[in-house]
Image (cartoon, grey):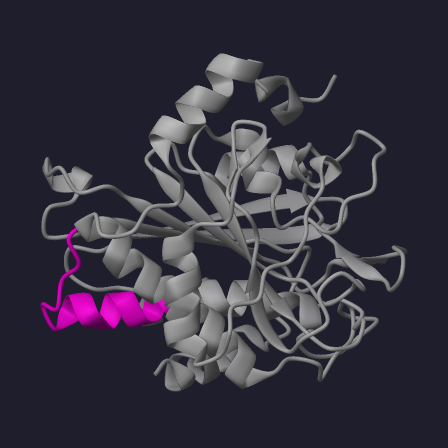
Amino acid sequence: MLLRQVLDVVDLLDHPCLPESEFRQVFSAPGVRLQLDSVETEAGRTLFFKLLIPGRQGRSSGGHAPSLGIIGYLGGIGARPHRIGLVSDADGCIAALAAGLKLLEMHRREDLLDGDVIVTTHITNTARVKEHYPVTFMESPVSPEIRNRMLVDEHMEAIISIDTTKGNRIINSRGFAISPTVLRGYILRVSEDLLQVQQDVTGRLPAVFAITTQDITPYGNGLFHLNSILQPATATAAPVVGVGITSETAVSGAATGASQAIDIEQAARFAVEIAKGYGRGSLRFYDPEEFARLVALYGSMEHLQRLP
């Protein structure tokens, strides 16, 4: 269970300032690498968070086990001074940090995974509210290009991108849902391995949310996007799966008091379980042979990862 970690992260984030010293205190441990970078724009300050938890046979120590990326992708955790407190859009950030905190605690106890895990997210509590159908979204003070550059690490060999996905009528159940795997401009079949982990974590039938070609193209092209959950897929050659924290009704990303601790905990626990299986090679995001056949038959779709 990661409920304590979720509550600890909520307490850390629900603050009118972004106290870097507290982040360093909470997320520091021998052998673990923490990087905090602050970016200032006219719209406000964003703190970029990166945590590397080394595995027993991880790439960072010359090993052969693959590295997983866990990204908390969002617009902002708050809209101060217009709205006080954490907004619904903060859920992906909370889940990623809670997963990172759990993995760090496991590392302290020498309960090591096989592969490295890289956790990244971005934190701002002065984000703007943006009009979006059917409910308002949060708009990050930094561009998608900067977010991708700071969050998508070249050493991530597979990525799960966690984001609040409540502002829609596509997925109408509480908890979390996953997307099909996205790889180099292709929307692939949903990973059976990830579906099984989702069932194990929730004790329910798996939930999958629909995505379209528009959703896997870069922001800024004027096309409708469900949300930003799959923007990391525009900046990597690694497979990406979206983990959307969902609701029965369409909830604004700017709504305060709208986060459900149990739903966030399940998404964070799912991320930890994926990290365990991916590092030891017992879990796949896609079938490499089938993908190679797809490209051979229909060609590259990597142009969808770029703005025209």
**Magenta region:** 99-115
Quarter of the view holding residue 195: bottom left
| Residue 141 in picture, x, y percent from top left | 71, 48
Q: Do we see residue 126 in this rendering? A: yes
20 or 221: nearer the viewer: 221
Quarter of the view holding residue 177: bottom right
Picture layout, residue 112 above or below residue 304? below
Residue in the picture at 74% in, 16% down: 308
Compared across the picture, whether 175 is left or right of 3 comes to right
211 or 17: nearer the viewer: 211
Residue in the picture at 63% in, 59% down: 124
Picture layout, residue 197 above or below residue 83? above
| Residue 296 in picture, x, y percent from top left | 47, 14
Magenta stretch: includes residue 273: no
| Residue 222 in picture, x, y percent from top left | 85, 33
Residue in the picture at 30% in, 57% down: 275
Compared across the picture, whether 27 is left or right of 249 comes to left
Picture layout, residue 235 above or below residue 260? above
Compared across the picture, whether 292 is left or right of 244 comes to left
Q: Do we see residue 54 in this rendering? A: no
283 or 38: nearer the viewer: 283
Magenta stretch: includes residue 107: yes
Picture layout, residue 20 above or below residue 116? below
